[in-house]
Amino acid sequence: MRDFLHIKTGRQTMTDSAAAIKTSNPQELQAFTPYQPAADEEYMSAGQIAHFRKILEDWRSELMAEVDRTVQNLQIENVNYSDPNDRASLETDMGLELRARDRERKLIRKINQTLARIDAGEYGYCEACGVEIGLRRLEARPTATLCIDCKTLEEKRERQMAQD
């Protein structure tokens, strides 16, 4: 994670939220390698399940490490500046950091739900229609629960509801 310098005081502050957001993408994980199925390999074979479980667990570990760093930063940054600009800057930084962590907390919950779907033998199949979601879609979004067709329909319904 990159740290940025607080311009006025020249000291390090909380981590850059834009850099923190990049952990929302599983392909950004260090050890990510696309799965190459064998020609006769069955969908959601043991190898594929192990591949996706590793992606999800690594992703969750990375997010949990960010949570730990945030807690440490909040403890370190517990300073009361006399300059209103410094105080405002610190509060803005903390607000961005906490919003990023809140999104990541929700993502961790979704990852845990996805791991439970793997344990239940339901991973990789659309919750709405039951068809295969597809390896490439799952690699792009390992927590996906809908196939591309059902997700497209859901998004169209959401847009229609927003327009009404």
Image (cartoon, helix red, strand yellow):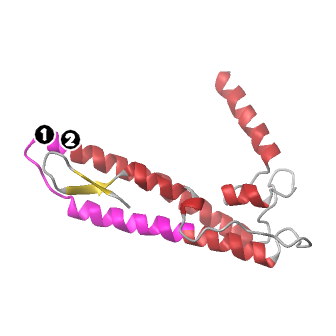
Q: Quadrant of residue 139?
A: bottom right
Residue 67 is left or right of residue 82, and the answer is right
Q: Tell me the residue that label 1 is attached to.
A: 84
Residue at (22%, 43%) from the top-left corner?
A: 89
* Residue 15 rendering spot, x and y as whole percentages: 33, 56
Q: Nearer the viewer, residue 51 or 129?
A: 51
- The reply to whether the magenta stretch includes residue 85 is yes
Residue 68 is left or right of residue 37, and the answer is left
In what quadrant of the picture does the N terminus appear?
Answer: bottom left
Q: Tell me the residue that label 2 is attached to.
A: 88
SS at mark 1 in the image: helix
Circle 1 residues within 10 Å: few <14, some 14–19, many ≥20: few
What is the CA distance from the residue labelled 1 to the residue labelled 2? 6 Å
- Residues in magenta? 59-88
* Residue 152 rendering spot, x and y as whole percentages: 76, 39
Verify CB contact (< 8 Å) between mark 1 and mark 2.
Answer: yes
Q: Nearer the viewer, residue 4 or 43?
A: 4
